[in-house]
Structure formats: C-alpha cells, structure tokens
Image (spheres, grey):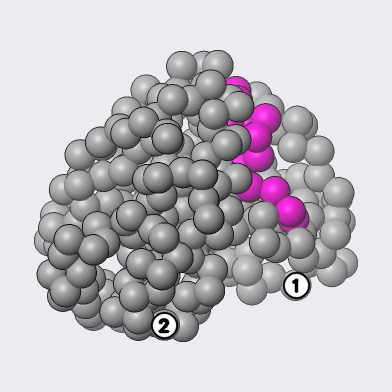
C-alpha cells in the first residue's frame, strides 16, 4: 500500500508505441489494480522520423484508443490523452501541426537521438571513448536547452536520458557535475518557458538505479524557483505502471515541493502531495 492518496502516472506507453507491449484498455484495468488515481498515455512520436515511420497514423490510433478508454473508465480512473513528442525542435512545423490537430491533455517533450544519429537506446557504446561521450553529452544537453527554450511542450522529460545507456547499460563513468553549467541553463529555461520538469522513475528499476534526472538536479530546480513538476514511470509493460512514484513523491517532498502537476487540455493543474 502506498502512503500517497493521489498517485498519477504521467508517462506510459501502450502497444501503439513501437516498444510498447499492452493495449490501452488492459493498462487501464491494471492501473486501477495498481492503485493509480490517474494515468497519462504518452505514446512515442519521433518527429524526425515522422514520415518514414508513419507516426501520424500511430498518433491517431493511440489518441482514439485513449479517448475510448477514458470513457470506459469514467469515475474509476482519470485518463489523460498524452503524447511523447521526441525531437520536436528538429522539425517544429510538423510538431506544431500534430499538437494542433489532436486535442491532447498533455505533451511530453524529449530528445532520444542527436540530429542525424540513432536513439541512444540502439547505440552500441561498448568501445565509446570518454572524449566521444563528452562530445555526445555536450551536444545532447545543447539540444535539451533548445527544447526547453522552445517551450511548446508541457514538460521536459528524462533530462539525463543518455546516462540510462552510457552509465547504466554500458558502465561508463560520467560525472554529471561536469555539465552543471548547461544543466543550470536548461533548468532556468524550463522555468522561463513556464513548462514543467519531469521526474522519470524508470531508472530506479534499471541498472542506472536513479531517477532521471537525479535528486540533486531536482533540488537545484527547486532552488532556482522551479514549481511545476510531473512524475512518470515510463512504463512499457503493465507490471511497471506506477513503479517508483512513491520514491519520486518522497524525493519531491525532501526537495521542498508541496505540489505535483498534471495537465488537462494542456493546462497545468497543481495538487498537494498527500
Ligand atoms: Zn523517452
Ligand atoms: Zn517514454
């Protein structure tokens, strides 16, 4: 049993994501069993592969299944229509067109790959040198800064995403403090743009064993005046729904946050952490 009454998982994937595994309806049933009060489905749309991988069709399919599930679970579970828009800054026209076409509640912004490169998820980083890692991370954080400055998504997801693979899966050592200048700029840009920062709890169940970003960065965001924050498990399986939410919420309380944020029709709503 959780000590928290209002558990909302705001980052999850259905089988309308290329790496998702379960249907929207099944995930809703499991979310209720997992004691969630609400869930946002945020299937992948990789903007820089939009035409090539037929993301428009997938986005519509995902959206309509969410709307169906929202009606079916009325009164039992809050269901938010979301999307994880990756690399939107690489083609803002396509990104904005999609955001204006479907009536999303919540749009997550993320970067999974550098321009013209593959997703870190697919990279073989076994023999990558420290110098290459430094150059990739520098470029990655520059892209995160552009995404935060662009400010048209609702939240900035998994700020330290490449570390899941570089440090977690491949065991390279990275001192995140070497990037503190650019990370400070990103956090300030998130605040200036009026968007929220995401605590992605997936890392807690993966080799990296930490939230993305980590507690130190969350505390810094708070110290800089950051108030809007979302929490999501990034579940790709039903059994991962809600995992790490309690840890995420206690981390927020330790960092001085009193409220968490969710979105309805793209408007932030803050509720007490209790
Ligand atoms: Zn992602
Ligand atoms: Zn995701």
| Number of other residues with Cα within 10 Å of mark 2, as a class: few under 14, some 14 to 19, many 20 or more | some
Foreground tag (1 vs 2): 2
Residue at screen point 76% across, 45% down: 134
Q: Is residue 177 magenta?
A: no
> Residue 229, image x and y in percent?
43, 36
Q: Which residues are magenta?
A: 208-221
Q: Is residue 147 above or below residue 129?
A: above
Q: Which residue is mark 1?
A: 124
**Left or right position of 12 against 185:** left
- Answer yes or no: is residue 173 visible: yes
Q: Is residue 214 magenta?
A: yes
> Residue 159, image x and y in percent?
56, 44
Name the one closer to the observer, 215 or 174. Answer: 215
Q: Which residue is mark 2?
A: 22
Q: Is residue 19 above or below residue 267?
A: below
Q: Residue 44 lies in what quarter of the image?
A: bottom left
Q: Residue 258 lies in what quarter of the image?
A: top left
**Left or right position of 132 against 92:** right
- Dot 1 or dot 2: first in sequence order is 2
Find out whether the residues at labels 1 and 2 contact each other: C-beta distance under 8 Å. Answer: no
SS type, badge 2: loop
Name the one closer to the observer, 56 or 90. Answer: 56
- Answer yes or no: is residue 18 visible: no
Q: Residue 138 lies in what quarter of the image?
A: top right
């Amino acid at each position: 049993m959780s000590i928290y009454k209002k558990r909302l998982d705001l980052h999850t994937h259905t089988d309308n994501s290329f790496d998702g595994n379960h249907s929207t309806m099944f995930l809703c049933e499991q979310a209720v069993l997992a004691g969630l009060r609400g869930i946002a489905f945020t299937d992948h749309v990789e903007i820089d592969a939009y035409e090539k991988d037929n993301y428009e069709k997938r986005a519509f399919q995902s959206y309509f299944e969410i709307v169906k599930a929202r009606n079916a679970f009325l009164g039992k579970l809050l269901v938010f229509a979301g999307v994880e828009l990756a690399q939107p800054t690489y083609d803002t026209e396509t990104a904005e067109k999609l955001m204006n076409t479907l009536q999303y509640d919540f749009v997550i912004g993320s970067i999974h790959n550098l321009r013209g490169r593959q997703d870190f998820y697919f990279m073989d980083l076994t023999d990558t040198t420290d110098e290459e890692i430094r150059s990739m991370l520098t470029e990655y954080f520059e892209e995160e800064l552009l995404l935060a400055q662009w400010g048209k998504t609702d939240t900035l997801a998994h700020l330290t995403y490449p570390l899941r693979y570089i440090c977690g899966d491949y065991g390279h050592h990275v001192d995140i403090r070497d990037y503190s200048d650019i990370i400070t700029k990103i956090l300030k840009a998130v605040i200036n743009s009026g968007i929220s920062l995401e605590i992605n709890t997936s890392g807690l169940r993966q080799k990296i064993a930490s939230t993305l970003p980590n507690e130190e960065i969350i505390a810094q965001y708070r110290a800089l005046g950051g108030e809007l924050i979302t929490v999501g498990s990034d579940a790709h399986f039903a059994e991962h729904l809600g995992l790490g939410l309690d840890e995420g919420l206690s981390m927020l309380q330790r960092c001085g946050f009193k409220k968490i944020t969710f979105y309805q029709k793209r408007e932030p709503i803050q509720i007490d952490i209790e």
